[in-house]
Image (cartoon, grey):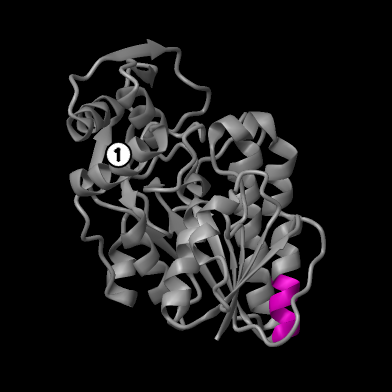
Amino acid sequence: MHAVITGGAGFLGSHLADALIARDFKVTVIDNLITGQLRNLSHLEGNPNLTFIQHDVADAFDVEGAVDFIFHFASPASPAEFKRIPVEVLRCGSFATHHGLDLAERKGATFFLASTSEVYGDPIVHPQPETYWGNVNSVGPRACYDEGKRYAEAATVTYRDYRGVQVRIARFFNTYGPRMRMDDGRVVPNFIRQALMGEPLTIYGEGHQTRSFGYYEDILDGVVRLALSDYQDPVNFGTHQEMTMLQFAEAVSEAVGIPCRTVHYPAAEDDPKQRHPDIQRAYEVLGWQPTTSLMEGLRKTVEYYRAELK
């Protein structure tokens, strides 16, 4: 089996490359390294089942030979990057999605879209099932990502319904683990880096906004199950363990082994107040559910960052 992974030098994409190669897939990674890092693939150097191509998938691309799966994981995903490179974020959701779908159509491959809980915006339905249409600000500071992913989903189901492309759509809720860039800007690397360096943990607003954190190994188990299934509607992947940012700061402090100190800054505009996935569909369709506890996942991630800071 041959899989193409766009964004395969990134946090989740590189772990997916590992998971597929472990299943004897041939993997072609395409990444322009705008946020991905070659070091995430360095342990695979010389592996005959890995091919790396440096290219911006928002520009047209092709791959030689037969292709079975195209995993579209390319996209900056940090709110800091929504301000720094918003046009690139939009291009990943739009042009890059079309190029991946066109390749899937040419090759007769299955197209797998890495979507996000951000398609639900600041939800007024809780927890969020896949049937919820969302509450998204199309002209706000997060629109390049939120609407880019919503457009990517629309493109994906359109190619499914009118071009006959086999598709899979995964909506990820706050996935974390080793290989997240320390300067990524998302809450997990931010909190862990600050705690390890003896700094107060940065809370935006009062800290009552909630998130549900899924460890990457659990999430990728769901990805592989979905890819190998025949299910073509969106599927949420996350955990039922919802917590406030204040509670999460305490959990990170416990994992690091230091007392929790926080500093508060003004709330970010359009920051969702709640994130809690309904994952019943994943269980019913795929037999999937997360098995890694938050503390277990955090301790493994802290160990990775400790080594990074040495």
Give whichever of 198, 240 is nearer the camera.
Answer: 198
Give whichever of 60, 210 is nearer the camera.
Answer: 60
Q: Is residue 140 visible?
A: no
**Figure check: 106 above or below 283:** below
- Three-letter code, disc 1: Val
The magenta-colored residue range is 101-107
Which residue is pictured at 53% across the width and 23% down the height?
Answer: 269
Disc 1 packing (10 Å; few <14; some 14–19; many ≥20): many
Give whichever of 122, 297 is nearer the camera.
Answer: 297
Which residue is pictured at 35% across the width and 44% down the height?
Answer: 304
Which residue is pictured at 71% across the width and 52% down the height?
Answer: 32
The answer to which quarter of the image holds residue 272 is top left
The C terminus lies in quadrant: top left
Label total for image: 1
Secondary-structure class at tag 1: helix
Please, what is the dominant secondary structure of the magenta stretch? Answer: helix
**Figure check: 120 above or below 2:** above
Q: Whole-percent x and y of residue 99?
A: 75, 66
Which residue is pictured at 76% across the width and 57% down the height?
Answer: 95
The answer to which quarter of the image holds residue 28 is bottom right
Q: Whole-percent x and y of residue 41?
A: 53, 59
**Figure check: 245 above or below 103:** above
Q: Is residue 7 visible?
A: yes
Q: Whole-percent x and y of residue 100?
A: 70, 68
Question: Does the magenta run of residues contain 225?
Answer: no
Instruction: Say left or right for 40 vs 293.
Output: right
**Most distant residue in the right direction:** 60
According to the image, label 1 marks what residue? 302
**Figure check: 25 above or below 241:** below
Q: Whole-percent x and y of residue 59?
A: 81, 58
